[in-house]
Each structure stands twice: as structure tokens, then as C-alpha cells.
Image (cartoon, grey):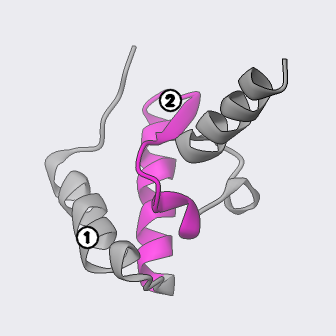
Amino acid sequence: KVLVPNKADREIVHKVIYQELCLGITEAASKAEYLRIIDVLAAQGAEAVILGCTEIGMLVNQADTTVSLLNTTAIHAQKAVEYATT
């Protein structure tokens, strides 16, 4: 089952990406909001959270939470290297 944040939390995610991360800005308050949203999803049964925007990894990483984070930028880069070297 795929879970998505509620509308208010999606708006927070969007705002942080486009008004901060895309501009190279990382705010502690925004990181706290992202971690809260991750915790909400975990409480709803999420086993992992996909970091589906290249900039999100600038704000949160696996060391920040016990919830498994799937950083799509890192995954794509790793698979590209594996493909190129095999």
C-alpha cells in the first residue's frame, strides 16, 4: 500500500522544496517538519519513505530517522555506476 502525506503536509513539502532547497537554503525548522511528516507516515504503517525529489537529500538523511529512507538520487547514481561498470 502506498501512503502519501495529507494535503497540508504535501503543501509543506512543496514549499520547502521550491522556496528553500531549490535555492540552496536548508532551515532547521523545515528539517523538523520533514521528520515530523516522516514520523506521521511511519505511524500510519509506512515501512520506508521515498525521497522523490533530488533536493530532499540536502535536508534529511538516514542518520536523522529510524524509518528507512529511499534517496532516489543516490539510488539512480548507484545503479548508473553499476550499469556502466558491468
Label located before the other in sequence (2 or 1): 1
Furthest residue in direction right, as rendered: 86
Q: Nearer the viewer, mark 2 or mark 1?
A: 1
Q: Nearer the viewer, residue 8 or 13?
A: 13
Residue placed most toward the observer, 78 or 68: 78
**Tag 2 and tag 1, C-beta contact below 8 Å:** no
Image: magenta residue range: 29-58
User: Which amino acid type is marked by label 2?
Assistant: Ala
| Main secondary-structure element of the magenta-colored stretch | helix
Label 1 sits on residue: 18
Hey, what amino acid is under mark 1?
Tyr
Could you say where residue 27 lies in the image, as x and y percent from the top left? 46, 86
- Point 65% across, 40% down: residue: 77
Query: Measuring 18% from the left and 60% from the top, which residue is drawn there?
Result: 11
Farthest residue, direction top: 1
* Secondary structure found at label 1: helix
Q: Is residue 57 magenta?
A: yes
**Is 36 left or right of 47, judged from the image as shown?**
left
CA distance separating discs 2 and 1: 25 Å
Residue picked out by circle 2: 46
Q: Is residue 40 above or below residue 43?
A: below
Quadrant where the C terminus is found in the figure: top right
When the figure is inspected, residue 30 is found, relative to residue 68, above or below; the finding is: below
Q: Residue at x 54, y 40 (%)?
A: 72
Where residue 53 appears, as percent x and y from the top left, is: 41, 50
Foreground pick, 73 / 2? 73
Quadrant containing the N terminus is: top left
> In the displayed structure, does residue 67 sit left or right of residue 3?
right
Q: Quadrant of residue 18?
A: bottom left
Which image quadrant for residue 6?
top left
Number of on-image labels = 2
